[in-house]
Image (tube, rainbow, N blue to C red):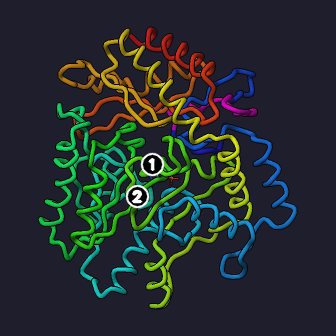
Amino acid sequence: MSHLFYQTKSPRPVLHRAEGIYMYAEDGKRYIDGSSGAMVSNIGHSNPAVLDAMRAQMEKSTFGYRLHFQTEASEELAEKIVARAPEGLDKVFFVSGGSEAVESCLKLARQYVLTQGEGTRYKVISRYPSYHGCTLGALAITGMSTMTAPFDPMMARMPKIPAPRAYLDGLDADDPATGLHYANMLEQKILDEGPDTVMAFIVEPVGGASTGALVPPAGYMQRIREICDAYGVLLIHDEVMTGGGRTGTFFGAEHWRTAPDLICLSKGFGAGYAPLGAMIARGDMVEAVMEAGGFVHGFTYAGNPLACAAGSAVLDVIDKGGLVAHSARMGDKLAERLRGLMQRYPLIGDVRGKGLLTAFELMADRATKEPLPKSLNAHSRLVDIAYDNGLIIYSRRTRGGTSGDHFLVCPPMIVTEEQLDEMTDILDRSLAQFM
Ligand code: PLP
């Protein structure tokens, strides 16, 4: 009997080894990592350059507590991140994952508004659906009742606005009026809550697990920035899933040329080689907090040199391989293939995404957008069929709204066109079995 506490109904096979986009179970069965785990393994598995960098770091040191030592590895990684970040966001605080990055942003934001004499501001507006992490602070701003319901009494109530799911509302996502329509809901919410109580707004530039690669409508991201500026509300981009190049730009928000005040980063930038995350903050915010006595926050493993060395090597691999541009190209090819399947399977109601953050959604009726009945359990059934056929995809059913079962198809950014064909063939076969 295993002593591990599995979160799947039945234990999954034992992983023996993984290389590139392929993972092999102990019994020799091969799986295509079509979701990069949970959109993490962006550069694929067992990259030799990253393994070498980690080995070299291990020879030097594997841990240095951040209050006792700076390390070359963390300094180097911070420099590389700032070089890619929007102007003015030049301070990096390392953590070990996405939820920790989100918590760090919330707490720095709060300490910053205190330094500005704005202690009445504490509310963080977020969207519904959204996912920002499983710790209680991040969960309080998560809009996903399946994840939050048991813990509701333990959390602060935070205001939420609808995510801009234009495809469900019958609106044209390319029409700037649509972007304005959804973004102005933020302004209304700020006014309803009382502008002097609102501290921040947090947004995933391209949706992840909650909305299934939802791309914001034209003008949305720009208008959000304007509204935050008008009401003195801090803007947080949760780039935990989008940061690191998957969408075809290093940060997801680069597609709309907007800059936030704080960025949360994790997943693809450690790429699964080590637990790694970061908050990237406006330098003046950090300065104000430090002058007022310092940031009252920190995790023991933060800035771990081994994790930082891995992250640094991952960024080099992304650069040397031109993987951001490759991700944009392969994303287009993948979307083409998924749209091909859409023509053959009326059950596929939508294909969406940016770069290799790509999803399709199953619906009972493409025209009315009616979701499949919950009792069909489509999200886990199709995932299981594909898994048996050797393809890993990622799915969620977002309840509490009208959205149905969406499936993220997000292979590592090193994927080739031939491998996309292989994935599409397995998906085709799996959909046929599902019907
Ligand atoms: N934010 C976003 C947008 C995410 O997609 C996730 C994880 O899926 C998180 C935060 C939480 O990250 P972690 O699971 O590493 O704590």
How far from the left and from the top, in percent, is residue 239? 46, 53
Instruction: Locate residue 209: give its quadrant.
Output: top left
Picture layout, residue 161 above or below residue 89: above
Do residues under tags 2 and 1 come within 8 Å of each other at their CB atoms? yes
Picture layout, residue 303 above or below residue 417: below
Residue at horizontal 48 percent and vertical 90 percent from the top = 291
**How many residues crowd around disc 1 within 10 Å: few (fewer than 14), some, or many (20 or more)?**
many
Residue 18 lies in the magenta-colored region: yes
Query: Which quadrant: the N terminus?
Result: top right
Seen from this angle, which residue lies furthest right?
59
Residue at horizontal 37 percent and vertical 49 percent from the top = 256
**Relative depth, front residue between 160 and 400:** 160
Identify the amino acid type marked 2. His
In the picture provided, is 274 more to the left or to the right than 423? right
Comes first in the chain, label 2 or label 1: 2
Identify the amino acid type marked 1. Gly
Mark nearest the camera among 2 and 1 is 1
**Residue tagged by mark 2?**
237
**Residue tagged by mark 1?**
252
Secondary element type, mark 2 = strand
In the picture provided, is 387 more to the left or to the right than 150? right
Picture layout, residue 74 above or below residue 251: below
In the picture provided, is 311 more to the left or to the right than 125? right
Residue at horizontal 26 percent and vertical 76 percent from the top = 121
- For the residues labelled 2 and 1, the Cα–Cα distance comes to 9 Å
Q: Which residues are magenta?
A: 8-22
Picture layout, residue 344 above or below residue 285: above
The rendered magenta stretch, by its main secondary structure, is classed as: loop
